[in-house]
Image (spheres, rainbow, N blue to C red):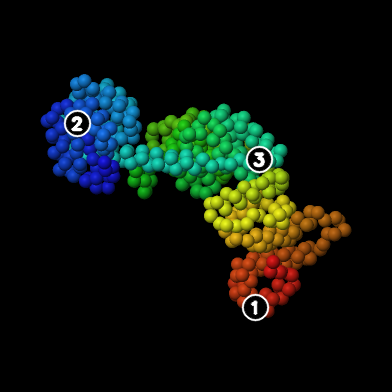
């Protein structure tokens, strides 16, 4: 049965009423407006229709019917499909029954003597709600499906401890704060906590608090009402509503503004919030997992992060060490990512060489696991290791060129005059930029000189002076 609503001819309506005159009246009125109309003379006939012919876009259901009344029929319908909009048809003086019907999930109600305009308004309202619920369910499904893969590899003693703590608290429903450098795998831990919890069959929703400006982040988290601002043409639920009964992962929580922090605190304390432009509170049951690469205690001292929110979030604190502090895991992770992306990209690439794995183990991994994963992707996509080896050499050279780090390790007898330090730093910076542009142009020196806005001869001199090689 058609369930689209872009055009009345695609909107199917089932009218359920034991009075033939009411059915005939609605059938004629709705057909004139372009709707496809079906009829059922009883609750039992309506249930039989739904089972055999599927669900219409909207159902009009009489409250007072013999044998199987409207309330019983409504319960049956909602048991079969909780999202189908049902508009109750009533007589005057049925207020208490109307309240009960709305509590059971009815979308709206109409008095049988209503005007055609009221009918139009009620149908429009039902269609909007039906579409909104479908959008929510589709999003929930997509987000839930995205949690099926969350491999937690732990070989080192430090990561075994992280896994042990995560397992202990996963099913306790407490708020967890995960912290560590960028790229260490904070999201992997958050997904592991969700997967091992009693909420695992419900949505896991990630929000990157650093990716959106304050105004957009608030509407993303808490939603907005129709007319809340220019462009808000209909109600939009926020991520907290999508995460109801599930888990919300607030990544980079340290980037959240103080105003939104106050609203988040209310959710953690009371399980409720109001949408932008809304007057009523929305109740939610959501587990919050937050992550940061900042020192939140320092942020609290400097008044950039609310102290009360910090203590609400920091019920359980899980620190993930950087990859350089767990070298035993580097070859294991490299092989895992290699197998994963070789299958994903369907590439026939030989196994990682022992030389590359040794270089991986000695590398500093400033970007942690994310950097390792990206390097493995490049090996597979490009089909050879030489590009990655060159990147590692350049990164190591850049790290060695850092004059500040060298100075920190100097003895007193090695300290240089400031002019020499400035000259060395300037040369190192030039070498870094020249090497980068040469690689981008595939070592086309003329093109590189043009990009850097220096003469060809000057570039050749700097390449020679800086001993920049095509590795």
Residue 255 figure quarter: top right
The residue indicated by pointer 2 is 40
| Disc with the residue nearer the chain's start (2 vs 3) | 2
The residue indicated by pointer 1 is 455
Q: In this image, 12 relative to 441: left or right?
A: left
Secondary element at tag 1: loop
Q: In this image, 319 relative to 4: left or right?
A: right
Residue situated in front as seen by the camera: 432 or 63: 63
> Residue 218 appears at what percent x and percent y?
47, 42
Mark 1 surroundings: few (<14), some (14-19) or many (≥20) residues within 10 A: few
> Residue 314 appears at what percent x and percent y?
61, 34
How far is mark 3 from mark 1, CA to CA? Answer: 53 Å
Mark 2 surroundings: few (<14), some (14-19) or many (≥20) residues within 10 A: some
Residue displayed at 17% across by 40% down: 30
Q: Are marks 2 and 1 in contact (CB under 8 Å)?
A: no
Residue displayed at 14% across by 31% down: 22
> Residue 240 appears at what percent x and percent y?
46, 37
The label shown at residue 154 is 3
> Residue 41 appears at what percent x and percent y?
18, 29
Q: Are marks 3 and 1 in contact (CB under 8 Å)?
A: no
Residue displayed at 64% across by 52% down: 372
Quarter of the image containing the N terminus?
top left
| Disc with the residue nearer the chain's start (2 vs 1) | 2
Q: Is residue 249 visible?
A: yes
Q: Is residue 303 visible?
A: no
The answer to whether 208 is drawn above or below residue 271 in the figure is below
Quarter of the image containing the C terminus?
bottom right
The answer to whether 160 is drawn above or below residue 462 in the figure is above
């Amino acid at each position: 049965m058609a369930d689209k609503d872009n055009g009345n001819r695609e909107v199917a309506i089932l009218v359920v009423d034991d009075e033939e005159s009411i059915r005939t009246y609605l059938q004629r009125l709705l057909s004139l407006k372009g709707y496809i109309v079906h009829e059922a003379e009883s609750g039992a006939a309506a249930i039989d229709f739904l089972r055999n012919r599927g669900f219409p876009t909207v159902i009009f259901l009489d409250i007072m019917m013999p044998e199987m009344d409207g309330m019983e029929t409504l319960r049956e319908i909602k048991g079969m499909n909780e999202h189908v909009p049902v508009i109750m048809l009533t007589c005057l003086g049925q207020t208490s029954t109307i309240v009960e019907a709305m509590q059971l999930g009815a979308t709206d109600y109409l008095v049988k003597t209503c005007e055609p305009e009221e009918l139009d308004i009620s149908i429009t309202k039902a269609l909007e709600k039906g579409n909104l619920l479908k959008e929510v369910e589709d999003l929930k499904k997509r987000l839930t499906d995205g949690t099926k893969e969350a491999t937690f590899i732990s070989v080192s003693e430090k990561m075994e401890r992280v896994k042990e703590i995560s397992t202990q608290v996963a099913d306790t429903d407490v708020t967890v704060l995960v912290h560590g450098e960028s790229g260490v795998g904070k999201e992997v831990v958050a997904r592991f906590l969700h997967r091992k919890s009693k909420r695992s069959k419900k949505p896991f929703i990630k929000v990157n608090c650093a990716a959106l400006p304050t105004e957009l982040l608030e509407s993303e988290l808490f939603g907005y009402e129709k007319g809340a601002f220019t462009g808000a043409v209909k109600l939009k639920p926020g991520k907290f509503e999508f995460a109801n009964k599930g888990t919300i992962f607030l990544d980079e929580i340290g980037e959240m503004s103080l105003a939104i922090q106050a609203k988040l605190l209310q959710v953690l304390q009371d399980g409720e919030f109001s949408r932008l432009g809304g007057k009523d509170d929305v109740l939610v049951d959501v587990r919050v997992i937050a992550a940061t690469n900042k020192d939140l205690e320092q942020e609290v001292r400097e008044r950039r992060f609310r102290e009360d929110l910090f203590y609400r979030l920091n019920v359980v604190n899980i620190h993930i060490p950087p990859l350089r502090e767990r070298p035993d895991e580097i070859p294991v992770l490299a092989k895992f990512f290699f197998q994963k992306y070789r299958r994903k990209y369907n590439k026939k690439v030989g196994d990682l060489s022992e030389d590359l794995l040794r270089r991986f183990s000695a590398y500093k991994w400033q970007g942690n696991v994310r950097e390792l994963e990206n390097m493995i992707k490049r090996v597979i996509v490009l089909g050879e290791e030489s590009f990655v080896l060159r990147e590692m050499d350049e990164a190591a050279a850049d790290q060695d060129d850092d004059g500040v780090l060298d100075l920190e390790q100097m003895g007193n007898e090695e300290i240089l005059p400031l002019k020499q330090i400035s000259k060395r730093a300037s040369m190192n910076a030039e070498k870094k930029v020249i090497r980068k542009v040469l690689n981008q142009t595939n070592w086309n020196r003329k093109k590189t000189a043009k990009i850097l806005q220096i003469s060809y001869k000057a570039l050749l001199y700097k390449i020679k002076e800086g001993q920049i090689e095509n590795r």
